[in-house]
Image (cartoon, rainbow, N blue to C red):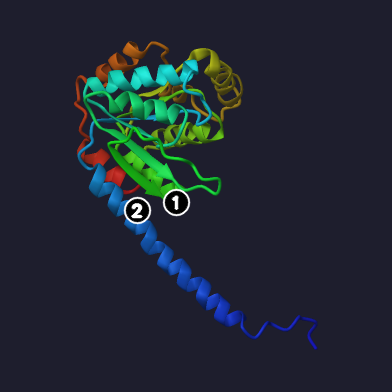
């Protein structure tokens, strides 16, 4: 005896079954990317809006998100949200009653996320990373309202992709400065001071509280170059 426990007789079959499921999972991921590309190809320019799923319909954050989305939609921007409740619903609702498409990128979660009803285009993802790519690939700007870990995850993703040049530079706008100021101070006082980021990295994000000023800032950013990705930027988006 070599001291090893005997391998179950059916372990090899179980491994083969698991590997087969992994292979089929790749096709599922491919189908999500394909459907998103096909259905979202015409929504540019688009703005991705993030924020808490827990904001109630009478919350100041909900009402603020709804107003921002309506102004963006009437200005010609498709509005993309996570398709769920709270600020996601507010973003879709504002755009739904505006002039441009309201897009929901829904996700299946263990505690099922209910999709909101204010979506002209609705996609449902099984895989978070396929959904994240869709948020980035079609975005002209990010607008980030108060939220929890999911919102911070999306904000960090956007900052990382822009900082590393994996996606084009674009406005990343934080809304409601009292909520974000402590985080921005920590970026400066800890991350920059300890040389974890460059001083210029702090310029990747800005804080704007007025809805009309948010729309104006996005237009101003693109006034000299247009909204369409440049050839090099298109190439980067293919390699996200």
Q: Nearer the viewer, residue 100 or 214?
A: 100
Q: Secondary structure at mark 2?
A: helix
User: Relative to residue 35, is residue 78 depicted above or below?
Assistant: above
Identify which residue is drawn at 56% across, 27% down.
Answer: 195
Mark 1 element type: loop
In the rendering, at what x and y percent does residue 146 appear? 51, 23
Q: Is residue 102 positioned above or below 187 on the image?
A: below
Marks 2,1: beta carbons within 8 A? yes
Residue 213 visible (yes or no):
yes
Question: Going by the image, does 3 lie left or right of 22?
Answer: right
User: In the figure, residue 121 lies in which quadrant?
Assistant: top left
Q: Tell me the quadrant of the picture where the N terminus can be found.
A: bottom right
Residue identified by numbered label 2: 32
Using the image, determine if residue 64 lies above or below residue 85: above
Residue 196 placed where, x, y %?
Answer: 56, 30
Residue drawn 49% across the image and 26% down it: 198
Q: Residue at x 51, y 75 (%)?
A: 17
Q: Position of residue 118 (x, y in %)?
A: 34, 32
Residue 120 in percent (x, y) is at: 27, 36
Label disc, if present, on residue 76 of the rendered structure: none
Dot 2, how many residues are within 10 Å of its Cα: few (below 14), some (14-19), or many (20+)?
many
Q: CA distance from mark 2 to mark 1?
A: 8 Å
Pointer 1 local density, CA inside 10 Å: few below 14, some 14–19, many at least 20: some
Q: In the image, is residue 54 above or below residue 233?
A: above
Determine which residue is flagged by label 1: 127
Residue 204 quadrant: top left
| Residue sitting at the far bottom | 1
Number of marks drawn? 2
Instruction: Pick whichever, 127 or 182, lies toward us.
Output: 127
Instruction: Compare residues 184 and 164 and report the one nearer the observer.
Output: 184
């Amino acid at each position: 005896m070599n001291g090893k426990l005997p391998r179950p007789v059916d372990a090899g079959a179980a491994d083969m079954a698991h590997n087969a499921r992994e292979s089929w999972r790749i096709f599922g991921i491919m189908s999500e990317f394909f459907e998103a590309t096909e259905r979202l190809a015409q929504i540019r320019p688009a703005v991705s809006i993030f924020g808490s799923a827990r904001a109630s319909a009478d919350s100041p954050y909900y009402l603020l998100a709804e107003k921002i989305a309506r102004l963006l939609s009437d200005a010609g921007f498709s509005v993309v949200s996570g398709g769920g409740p709270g600020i996601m619903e507010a973003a879709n609702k504002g755009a739904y009653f505006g002039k441009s498409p309201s897009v929901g990128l829904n996700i299946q979660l263990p505690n099922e996320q209910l999709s909101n009803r204010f979506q002209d285009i609705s996609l449902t993802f099984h895989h978070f990373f396929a959904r994240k790519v869709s948020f980035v690939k079609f975005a002209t700007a990010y607008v980030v309202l108060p939220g929890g870990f999911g919102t911070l995850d999306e904000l960090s993703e956007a900052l990382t992709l822009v900082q590393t040049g994996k996606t084009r530079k674009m406005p990343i706008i934080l809304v409601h400065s009292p909520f974000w100021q402590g985080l921005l101070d920590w970026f400066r006082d800890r991350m920059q001071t300890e040389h974890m980021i460059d001083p210029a990295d702090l310029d990747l994000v800005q804080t704007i509280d007025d809805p009309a000023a948010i729309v104006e800032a996005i237009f101003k950013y693109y006034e000299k170059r247009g909204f369409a990705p440049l050839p090099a930027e298109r190439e980067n988006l293919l390699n996200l």
